[in-house]
Image (cartoon, helix red, strand yellow):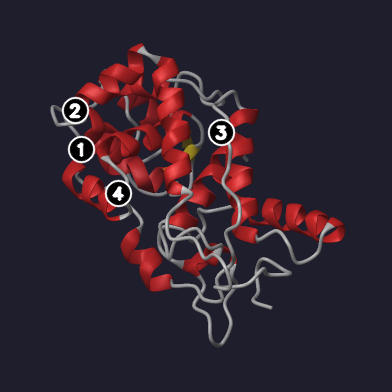
Amino acid sequence: MAASLIRLHFHDCFVQGCDASILLDETSSIQSEKTAGPNDNSLRGYEVIDKAKSKVEKICPGVVSCADIIAVAARDASAYVGGPSWAVKLGRRDSTTASRNLANTDLPAFTESLDKLTSRFQKKGLTARDMVALSGSHTIGQAQCFTFRDRIYNSSNIDAGFASTRKRRCPRTGGQANLAPLDLVTPNSFDNNYFKNLMRNKGLLHSDQVLFNGGSTDSIVTEYSRNPAKFSSDFASAMIKMGNIHPLTGSAGQIRRICSAVN
């Protein structure tokens, strides 16, 4: 679940800030983010957060927010698969609202250009370097066929052997949800092979390969491919920055008792 838990934190923080709005279920007054385009039948790990929350509630009820649990889970997921660890700032509170509309408009898409992606991250206070480092989390995890079909059949900046391998499990029609690893070399280890893959035109998603395609971020990709320690430290720094996006603090929001519903 490591990749999914890191992604859960990302998809939480980019919509209304790191406030656990992603965890709220649909009600008459809440439009759940879980059914937004980028999340529906894709985002997962909710039950991992619920399990952690219920254990924490037994020990110290009403103290630890769901938003903080997501942030800690992302850090632990990274460390568990050999990635960096970092000190997670705590004290976020949970939202009483969610926004399916913002989830549909604020989350990056796998089809987007480098300029579009860069501006999305900048709007959240993250630099191009932060964006490239955070994209390096695609050293683990998988993507569904519909997200990379256009790339493997229609792109010119793709390694031919890599494309033909991926076509085996991702036909031109059907097989929408068939999975492929984002990092073909070491799919379950948090390392810098993702960047080496990009330099060989073996990025799975369009939004991966645009990071190394003759543009302004090529030099960062090259740097991370040669210097895994620099990637690790930049990834940790970028995760801390991402975890600081518009938190609810003080008396704002609440500490939810159950992560999927407001108190």
Callout 2 amino acid: Asn
**Residue found at the far bottom of this picture:** 28
Q: Position of residue 199 (x, y in %)?
A: 27, 19
Say if mark 4 contacts mark 3, CB within 8 Å. no
Which residue corresponds to mark 3?
86
Count of marks placed on residues? 4
245 is higher (above) or lower (below) than 3: below
Q: In this view, does 131 lie above or below 186?
A: below
Is the Cβ of the residue at disc 2 closer than 8 Å to that at disc 3? Answer: no
Is 176 drawn above or below residue 57 in the view shown? above
Residue on which disc 1 sits: 154
Q: Position of residue 84 (x, y in %)?
A: 54, 27
Q: Earlier in the sequence, mark 4 or mark 3?
A: 3
Q: Earlier in the sequence, mark 1 or mark 4?
A: 4
User: Closer to the N terminus: mark 2 or mark 3?
Assistant: 3
Pointer 4: what residue? Answer: 121
Expressed as whole percent of the image width and height from the top left, the position of residue 47 reads: 69, 55
Q: Tell me the residue at 20%/41% (across/down).
A: 114
Residue picked out by circle 2 = 157
Identified at 25% across, 47% down, the residue is 117
- The reply to whether dot 3 and dot 1 touch (C-beta < 8 Å) is no
For label 3, count other residues whose C-alpha is less than 10 Å away and answer few (under 14), some (14-19) or many (20+): some
Which label's residue is closer to the chain start, 2 or 4?
Answer: 4
Q: Nearer the viewer, residue 38 or 173?
A: 38
- Residue 165: image quadrant is top left
- Mark 4: few/some/many CA within 10 Å (<14, 14-19, 20+): some
Question: Is there CB contact under 8 Å for labels 2 and 4?
Answer: no
Left or right of 6 in this view: 72:
right
CA separation in Å, label 2 and label 4: 24 Å
Q: Which of marks 4 and 3 is in front?
A: 3
Res 238 → quadrant: top left
Q: Is mark 4 on a helix, strand or loop?
A: helix
